[in-house]
Amino acid sequence: MRNKKVIIKLVLISFCVNADAQSNMDTILSTISKNNKTLIASQQYYQAVNLQYKTGLTPYNPTAEYDFLSGSPANAGNQQDFTISQSFDFPTAYIKKNQLANQQIIQSEYQFTVKRQDILLEAKKVCIALVYHNKLQTIFGQRKKDAEKLLSNFQVRMDKGEGNIMDVNKAQLQLIEIKKEFQENISATNQLNQKLTELNGGIAISFSDTIYPSLPIIPTFEQLEKDYEGADPLLKILQQEKVIAQKQIEVSKAMWLPKAEVGYHYQGILGQTYRGIHTGITIPLWENKNTVKQKKSQLLLTDFELEAHVNEHYFHIKHIYEKYANLKIALAEYQTVFASLNNTALLNKALMLGQISSIEYFMEMSYYNNAFNNYLQTEKEFYEVISELYKYQL
Protein backbone atom coordinates (compact mmCIF):
# COMPACT_ATOMS: atom_id res chain seq x y z
CA MET A 1 0.00 0.00 0.00
CA ARG A 2 2.84 2.34 0.82
CA ASN A 3 4.53 1.61 -2.52
CA LYS A 4 1.27 2.33 -4.30
CA LYS A 5 1.03 5.73 -2.62
CA VAL A 6 4.62 6.55 -3.60
CA ILE A 7 3.93 5.65 -7.23
CA ILE A 8 0.79 7.78 -7.30
CA LYS A 9 2.69 10.69 -5.77
CA LEU A 10 5.45 10.41 -8.39
CA VAL A 11 2.88 10.32 -11.20
CA LEU A 12 1.21 13.47 -9.84
CA ILE A 13 4.55 15.25 -9.53
CA SER A 14 5.42 14.28 -13.10
CA PHE A 15 2.05 15.56 -14.32
CA CYS A 16 2.49 18.88 -12.52
CA VAL A 17 5.98 19.32 -13.98
CA ASN A 18 4.71 18.62 -17.50
CA ALA A 19 1.75 20.94 -16.97
CA ASP A 20 4.11 23.69 -15.78
CA ALA A 21 6.33 23.16 -18.83
CA GLN A 22 3.30 23.42 -21.11
CA SER A 23 2.14 26.54 -19.27
CA ASN A 24 5.58 28.18 -19.48
CA MET A 25 5.85 27.54 -23.20
CA ASP A 26 2.32 28.80 -23.81
CA THR A 27 3.17 31.96 -21.88
CA ILE A 28 6.27 32.49 -24.02
CA LEU A 29 4.28 32.04 -27.24
CA SER A 30 1.51 34.35 -26.02
CA THR A 31 4.06 37.05 -25.15
CA ILE A 32 5.77 36.76 -28.54
CA SER A 33 2.46 36.94 -30.39
CA LYS A 34 1.87 40.34 -28.73
CA ASN A 35 5.39 41.79 -29.00
CA ASN A 36 6.77 40.42 -32.27
CA LYS A 37 7.64 43.34 -34.56
CA THR A 38 6.84 41.43 -37.75
CA LEU A 39 3.36 40.56 -36.48
CA ILE A 40 2.74 44.12 -35.33
CA ALA A 41 3.81 45.42 -38.76
CA SER A 42 1.66 42.79 -40.47
CA GLN A 43 -1.37 43.81 -38.43
CA GLN A 44 -0.87 47.41 -39.47
CA TYR A 45 -0.36 46.37 -43.09
CA TYR A 46 -3.57 44.34 -43.25
CA GLN A 47 -5.50 47.13 -41.56
CA ALA A 48 -4.33 49.44 -44.35
CA VAL A 49 -5.16 46.80 -46.98
CA ASN A 50 -8.66 46.33 -45.56
CA LEU A 51 -9.26 50.07 -45.72
CA GLN A 52 -8.15 49.96 -49.34
CA TYR A 53 -10.66 47.19 -50.05
CA LYS A 54 -13.39 49.42 -48.58
CA THR A 55 -12.32 52.34 -50.79
CA GLY A 56 -14.24 53.01 -54.00
CA LEU A 57 -17.49 51.41 -52.88
CA THR A 58 -19.41 54.69 -52.79
CA PRO A 59 -20.81 56.69 -55.75
CA TYR A 60 -18.51 58.94 -57.78
CA ASN A 61 -17.83 62.54 -56.72
CA PRO A 62 -20.48 65.06 -57.84
CA THR A 63 -19.56 67.31 -60.76
CA ALA A 64 -20.27 71.05 -60.97
CA GLU A 65 -19.87 72.96 -64.26
CA TYR A 66 -20.28 76.68 -65.01
CA ASP A 67 -20.07 78.39 -68.41
CA PHE A 68 -20.15 82.14 -69.06
CA LEU A 69 -20.43 83.15 -72.73
CA SER A 70 -20.26 86.86 -73.67
CA GLY A 71 -22.34 87.81 -76.66
CA SER A 72 -21.22 89.67 -79.77
CA PRO A 73 -22.12 92.33 -80.89
CA ALA A 74 -22.34 94.17 -77.56
CA ASN A 75 -26.14 94.19 -77.43
CA ALA A 76 -26.44 90.48 -78.09
CA GLY A 77 -26.42 89.69 -74.38
CA ASN A 78 -24.56 87.05 -72.41
CA GLN A 79 -25.25 83.40 -71.74
CA GLN A 80 -24.67 81.50 -68.47
CA ASP A 81 -24.86 77.76 -67.91
CA PHE A 82 -24.57 75.98 -64.57
CA THR A 83 -24.85 72.23 -64.05
CA ILE A 84 -24.36 70.10 -60.96
CA SER A 85 -24.62 66.34 -61.46
CA GLN A 86 -24.04 63.01 -59.78
CA SER A 87 -23.03 59.82 -61.59
CA PHE A 88 -24.00 56.32 -60.40
CA ASP A 89 -23.09 52.81 -61.38
CA PHE A 90 -25.97 50.44 -61.79
CA PRO A 91 -27.21 49.61 -58.20
CA THR A 92 -26.22 45.94 -58.60
CA ALA A 93 -22.56 46.99 -58.98
CA TYR A 94 -22.44 48.48 -55.47
CA ILE A 95 -23.83 45.29 -53.97
CA LYS A 96 -21.27 43.16 -55.79
CA LYS A 97 -18.38 45.49 -54.92
CA ASN A 98 -19.26 45.32 -51.21
CA GLN A 99 -19.47 41.54 -51.34
CA LEU A 100 -16.06 41.40 -53.03
CA ALA A 101 -14.50 43.71 -50.43
CA ASN A 102 -15.87 41.58 -47.58
CA GLN A 103 -14.36 38.42 -49.08
CA GLN A 104 -11.00 40.16 -49.58
CA ILE A 105 -10.99 41.23 -45.92
CA ILE A 106 -11.65 37.63 -44.86
CA GLN A 107 -8.69 36.54 -46.96
CA SER A 108 -6.39 39.11 -45.33
CA GLU A 109 -7.27 37.57 -41.94
CA TYR A 110 -6.14 34.15 -43.20
CA GLN A 111 -2.94 35.70 -44.57
CA PHE A 112 -2.17 37.18 -41.16
CA THR A 113 -2.87 33.79 -39.53
CA VAL A 114 -0.25 32.18 -41.80
CA LYS A 115 2.30 34.79 -40.76
CA ARG A 116 1.46 34.32 -37.06
CA GLN A 117 1.68 30.54 -37.23
CA ASP A 118 5.07 30.66 -38.98
CA ILE A 119 6.52 32.92 -36.28
CA LEU A 120 4.98 31.00 -33.37
CA LEU A 121 6.21 27.69 -34.78
CA GLU A 122 9.70 29.15 -35.01
CA ALA A 123 9.42 30.35 -31.40
CA LYS A 124 8.13 26.96 -30.25
CA LYS A 125 11.04 25.19 -31.91
CA VAL A 126 13.43 27.59 -30.19
CA CYS A 127 11.81 26.68 -26.84
CA ILE A 128 12.14 22.98 -27.64
CA ALA A 129 15.80 23.49 -28.54
CA LEU A 130 16.28 25.33 -25.25
CA VAL A 131 14.80 22.43 -23.29
CA TYR A 132 17.28 20.17 -25.09
CA HIS A 133 20.27 22.42 -24.36
CA ASN A 134 19.17 23.05 -20.77
CA LYS A 135 19.04 19.29 -20.22
CA LEU A 136 22.45 18.95 -21.85
CA GLN A 137 23.84 21.63 -19.56
CA THR A 138 22.86 19.64 -16.49
CA ILE A 139 24.36 16.48 -17.97
CA PHE A 140 27.55 18.19 -19.14
CA GLY A 141 27.91 19.74 -15.69
CA GLN A 142 27.74 16.32 -14.06
CA ARG A 143 30.15 14.86 -16.61
CA LYS A 144 32.53 17.71 -15.91
CA LYS A 145 32.44 16.99 -12.16
CA ASP A 146 32.99 13.26 -12.78
CA ALA A 147 35.91 13.95 -15.12
CA GLU A 148 37.52 16.35 -12.63
CA LYS A 149 37.12 13.76 -9.86
CA LEU A 150 38.59 11.03 -12.06
CA LEU A 151 41.57 13.23 -13.00
CA SER A 152 42.14 13.99 -9.32
CA ASN A 153 42.06 10.25 -8.49
CA PHE A 154 44.54 9.44 -11.24
CA GLN A 155 46.88 12.19 -10.06
CA VAL A 156 46.69 10.93 -6.46
CA ARG A 157 47.42 7.38 -7.58
CA MET A 158 50.33 8.56 -9.70
CA ASP A 159 51.75 10.52 -6.76
CA LYS A 160 51.55 7.34 -4.69
CA GLY A 161 53.29 5.36 -7.42
CA GLU A 162 50.17 3.33 -8.15
CA GLY A 163 49.28 5.01 -11.45
CA ASN A 164 50.96 6.34 -14.56
CA ILE A 165 51.14 9.54 -16.57
CA MET A 166 49.25 7.96 -19.48
CA ASP A 167 46.09 7.65 -17.40
CA VAL A 168 46.46 11.24 -16.21
CA ASN A 169 46.88 12.47 -19.78
CA LYS A 170 43.80 10.57 -20.95
CA ALA A 171 41.77 12.01 -18.09
CA GLN A 172 43.02 15.51 -18.91
CA LEU A 173 42.05 15.10 -22.58
CA GLN A 174 38.62 13.82 -21.61
CA LEU A 175 38.13 16.78 -19.26
CA ILE A 176 39.16 19.21 -22.01
CA GLU A 177 36.60 17.68 -24.39
CA ILE A 178 33.85 17.84 -21.78
CA LYS A 179 34.68 21.47 -20.92
CA LYS A 180 34.57 22.31 -24.61
CA GLU A 181 31.10 20.73 -24.94
CA PHE A 182 30.05 22.50 -21.74
CA GLN A 183 31.08 25.95 -23.04
CA GLU A 184 29.65 25.33 -26.53
CA ASN A 185 26.35 24.37 -24.97
CA ILE A 186 26.32 27.56 -22.88
CA SER A 187 26.94 29.54 -26.05
CA ALA A 188 24.14 27.71 -27.90
CA THR A 189 21.75 28.35 -25.00
CA ASN A 190 22.60 32.05 -24.95
CA GLN A 191 22.06 32.32 -28.71
CA LEU A 192 18.68 30.60 -28.47
CA ASN A 193 17.57 32.92 -25.66
CA GLN A 194 18.74 35.87 -27.78
CA LYS A 195 16.62 34.49 -30.63
CA LEU A 196 13.63 34.39 -28.30
CA THR A 197 14.31 38.02 -27.35
CA GLU A 198 14.48 38.92 -31.05
CA LEU A 199 11.16 37.17 -31.70
CA ASN A 200 9.74 39.00 -28.68
CA GLY A 201 10.36 42.35 -30.34
CA GLY A 202 13.69 42.99 -28.57
CA ILE A 203 12.17 42.66 -25.09
CA ALA A 204 14.41 40.39 -22.99
CA ILE A 205 12.97 36.92 -22.46
CA SER A 206 14.43 33.53 -21.61
CA PHE A 207 13.31 29.92 -21.21
CA SER A 208 15.01 27.71 -18.64
CA ASP A 209 12.79 24.62 -18.61
CA THR A 210 14.38 21.17 -18.76
CA ILE A 211 11.06 19.34 -19.23
CA TYR A 212 9.25 19.12 -22.55
CA PRO A 213 5.54 20.00 -22.61
CA SER A 214 3.04 17.18 -22.21
CA LEU A 215 2.36 15.27 -25.41
CA PRO A 216 -1.01 15.59 -27.12
CA ILE A 217 -2.86 12.45 -28.14
CA ILE A 218 -1.71 11.90 -31.73
CA PRO A 219 -4.59 10.52 -33.84
CA THR A 220 -4.25 8.38 -36.94
CA PHE A 221 -2.77 10.01 -40.03
CA GLU A 222 -6.14 10.12 -41.76
CA GLN A 223 -7.76 11.96 -38.84
CA LEU A 224 -4.82 14.30 -38.34
CA GLU A 225 -4.67 15.15 -42.04
CA LYS A 226 -8.41 15.86 -42.00
CA ASP A 227 -8.09 18.10 -38.93
CA TYR A 228 -5.05 19.88 -40.40
CA GLU A 229 -6.71 20.58 -43.74
CA GLY A 230 -9.89 21.71 -42.00
CA ALA A 231 -8.00 24.47 -40.17
CA ASP A 232 -5.12 25.15 -42.57
CA PRO A 233 -5.06 28.91 -43.34
CA LEU A 234 -3.09 28.31 -46.56
CA LEU A 235 -5.90 26.13 -47.86
CA LYS A 236 -8.45 28.72 -46.73
CA ILE A 237 -6.52 31.43 -48.60
CA LEU A 238 -6.72 29.45 -51.84
CA GLN A 239 -10.40 28.66 -51.25
CA GLN A 240 -10.95 32.33 -50.62
CA GLU A 241 -9.07 33.17 -53.82
CA LYS A 242 -11.68 31.13 -55.68
CA VAL A 243 -14.54 32.95 -53.93
CA ILE A 244 -12.90 36.30 -54.71
CA ALA A 245 -12.42 35.34 -58.37
CA GLN A 246 -16.12 34.46 -58.58
CA LYS A 247 -17.06 37.79 -56.99
CA GLN A 248 -14.76 39.64 -59.39
CA ILE A 249 -16.61 38.05 -62.30
CA GLU A 250 -19.90 39.26 -60.81
CA VAL A 251 -18.48 42.77 -60.38
CA SER A 252 -17.17 42.78 -63.97
CA LYS A 253 -20.58 41.76 -65.27
CA ALA A 254 -22.28 44.43 -63.15
CA MET A 255 -19.91 47.06 -64.57
CA TRP A 256 -21.25 46.25 -68.04
CA LEU A 257 -24.62 47.63 -66.99
CA PRO A 258 -25.35 51.30 -67.89
CA LYS A 259 -24.24 54.15 -65.60
CA ALA A 260 -26.73 56.90 -64.83
CA GLU A 261 -26.18 60.62 -64.25
CA VAL A 262 -28.73 63.00 -62.72
CA GLY A 263 -28.49 66.62 -61.62
CA TYR A 264 -29.66 70.22 -61.86
CA HIS A 265 -29.15 72.48 -64.90
CA TYR A 266 -29.55 76.28 -64.98
CA GLN A 267 -29.29 78.40 -68.13
CA GLY A 268 -29.54 82.18 -68.52
CA ILE A 269 -29.64 83.71 -72.02
CA LEU A 270 -30.90 87.03 -73.41
CA GLY A 271 -32.50 87.98 -70.12
CA GLN A 272 -34.35 84.69 -69.84
CA THR A 273 -33.62 81.87 -67.40
CA TYR A 274 -34.22 78.15 -67.66
CA ARG A 275 -34.03 75.60 -64.83
CA GLY A 276 -34.52 71.88 -64.96
CA ILE A 277 -33.30 68.36 -64.48
CA HIS A 278 -30.09 67.10 -66.01
CA THR A 279 -29.98 63.40 -66.85
CA GLY A 280 -27.62 61.18 -68.76
CA ILE A 281 -26.63 57.58 -69.33
CA THR A 282 -23.30 55.96 -70.10
CA ILE A 283 -23.35 52.89 -72.31
CA PRO A 284 -20.28 50.66 -71.58
CA LEU A 285 -19.30 49.61 -75.07
CA TRP A 286 -15.48 49.50 -74.88
CA GLU A 287 -14.20 50.46 -71.40
CA ASN A 288 -14.58 47.02 -69.79
CA LYS A 289 -13.81 44.89 -72.81
CA ASN A 290 -12.30 41.46 -71.94
CA THR A 291 -12.57 42.02 -68.17
CA VAL A 292 -15.10 39.20 -67.72
CA LYS A 293 -12.96 36.82 -69.80
CA GLN A 294 -9.89 37.74 -67.74
CA LYS A 295 -11.69 37.10 -64.46
CA LYS A 296 -12.99 33.74 -65.68
CA SER A 297 -9.44 32.77 -66.62
CA GLN A 298 -8.32 33.81 -63.11
CA LEU A 299 -11.05 31.61 -61.61
CA LEU A 300 -9.78 28.63 -63.60
CA LEU A 301 -6.25 29.30 -62.32
CA THR A 302 -7.43 29.29 -58.70
CA ASP A 303 -8.97 25.83 -59.26
CA PHE A 304 -5.64 24.45 -60.43
CA GLU A 305 -3.74 26.12 -57.56
CA LEU A 306 -6.21 24.70 -55.03
CA GLU A 307 -5.84 21.18 -56.39
CA ALA A 308 -2.04 21.49 -56.42
CA HIS A 309 -1.98 22.69 -52.82
CA VAL A 310 -4.25 19.90 -51.54
CA ASN A 311 -2.07 17.30 -53.25
CA GLU A 312 1.22 18.84 -52.12
CA HIS A 313 0.03 19.42 -48.57
CA TYR A 314 -1.26 15.87 -48.20
CA PHE A 315 2.16 14.40 -48.93
CA HIS A 316 3.90 17.05 -46.82
CA ILE A 317 1.82 16.07 -43.78
CA LYS A 318 2.32 12.39 -44.60
CA HIS A 319 6.11 12.90 -44.65
CA ILE A 320 6.03 14.63 -41.25
CA TYR A 321 3.73 11.96 -39.79
CA GLU A 322 6.00 9.13 -40.96
CA LYS A 323 8.97 10.93 -39.46
CA TYR A 324 7.03 11.23 -36.20
CA ALA A 325 6.21 7.49 -36.24
CA ASN A 326 9.87 6.52 -36.83
CA LEU A 327 11.14 8.86 -34.13
CA LYS A 328 8.54 7.53 -31.70
CA ILE A 329 9.87 3.98 -32.16
CA ALA A 330 13.50 5.07 -31.83
CA LEU A 331 12.75 7.19 -28.75
CA ALA A 332 10.87 4.35 -27.05
CA GLU A 333 13.83 2.03 -27.64
CA TYR A 334 16.26 4.59 -26.21
CA GLN A 335 14.04 5.11 -23.16
CA THR A 336 13.76 1.39 -22.53
CA VAL A 337 17.53 0.90 -22.67
CA PHE A 338 18.55 3.94 -20.63
CA ALA A 339 15.89 3.27 -17.99
CA SER A 340 17.84 0.17 -16.91
CA LEU A 341 21.38 1.43 -17.59
CA ASN A 342 23.74 3.04 -15.14
CA ASN A 343 26.97 2.73 -17.09
CA THR A 344 28.74 5.64 -15.45
CA ALA A 345 28.54 4.17 -11.96
CA LEU A 346 29.38 0.67 -13.19
CA LEU A 347 32.36 1.85 -15.23
CA ASN A 348 33.71 3.94 -12.35
CA LYS A 349 33.42 0.97 -9.99
CA ALA A 350 35.04 -1.43 -12.47
CA LEU A 351 37.90 1.00 -13.07
CA MET A 352 38.54 1.51 -9.35
CA LEU A 353 38.54 -2.26 -8.78
CA GLY A 354 40.94 -2.78 -11.68
CA GLN A 355 38.44 -4.90 -13.63
CA ILE A 356 38.95 -2.78 -16.74
CA SER A 357 41.84 -0.71 -18.04
CA SER A 358 41.74 3.06 -18.40
CA ILE A 359 41.62 2.66 -22.20
CA GLU A 360 38.56 0.41 -21.92
CA TYR A 361 37.01 2.86 -19.46
CA PHE A 362 37.39 5.87 -21.74
CA MET A 363 36.20 3.95 -24.81
CA GLU A 364 33.11 2.64 -23.01
CA MET A 365 32.39 6.03 -21.45
CA SER A 366 32.72 7.75 -24.81
CA TYR A 367 30.38 5.21 -26.42
CA TYR A 368 27.82 5.59 -23.62
CA ASN A 369 27.94 9.41 -23.69
CA ASN A 370 27.55 9.52 -27.47
CA ALA A 371 24.59 7.17 -27.28
CA PHE A 372 22.96 9.29 -24.57
CA ASN A 373 23.58 12.46 -26.61
CA ASN A 374 21.89 10.77 -29.59
CA TYR A 375 18.97 9.86 -27.34
CA LEU A 376 18.53 13.50 -26.31
CA GLN A 377 18.86 14.62 -29.94
CA THR A 378 16.16 12.12 -30.98
CA GLU A 379 13.93 13.37 -28.18
CA LYS A 380 14.34 16.97 -29.39
CA GLU A 381 13.57 16.02 -33.00
CA PHE A 382 10.52 14.08 -31.82
CA TYR A 383 9.03 17.14 -30.12
CA GLU A 384 9.93 19.36 -33.09
CA VAL A 385 8.03 17.06 -35.45
CA ILE A 386 4.99 17.10 -33.16
CA SER A 387 5.08 20.90 -33.11
CA GLU A 388 4.98 20.84 -36.93
CA LEU A 389 2.04 18.42 -36.93
CA TYR A 390 0.13 20.79 -34.66
CA LYS A 391 1.19 24.03 -36.31
CA TYR A 392 -2.39 24.60 -37.42
CA GLN A 393 -3.43 25.05 -33.76
CA LEU A 394 -0.98 27.91 -33.06
Image: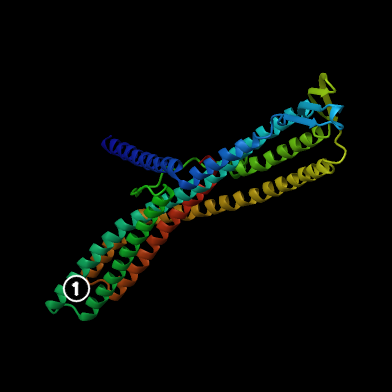
Task: Place residue 376 in its image quadrant.
Answer: bottom left
Vertical relation: 360 (above or below) 118: below
Answer above or below: position of 361 versus 76. below
For this rendering, which residue is in front, 113 or 175? 113
Say whether residue 340 is visible.
no
**Image x and y of residue 256, in percent:** 83, 34
Q: Residue furthest left?
A: 160
**Which percent across, then down, holds residue 379?**
43, 54
Residue 30 shows up from this direction? yes
Residue beneath label 1, please?
154
Mark count: 1
> Which of the two residues, 201 or 352, is positioned nearer the viewer here?
201
Residue beneath the point at 30% across and 75% down: 359
Name the residue nearer the viewer: 346 or 332.
332
Q: Residue at x 72, y 29 (%)?
A: 62
Q: Position of residue 176 (x, y in %)?
A: 28, 71
Hey, which quadrant is residue 142 in on the image? bottom left
Q: Residues within 10 Å of mark 1 (few under 14, many from 20)?
A: many
Q: Quadrant of the N terminus?
A: top left
Residue ID at (81%, 23%): 268
Q: Amino acid at mark 1?
A: Phe
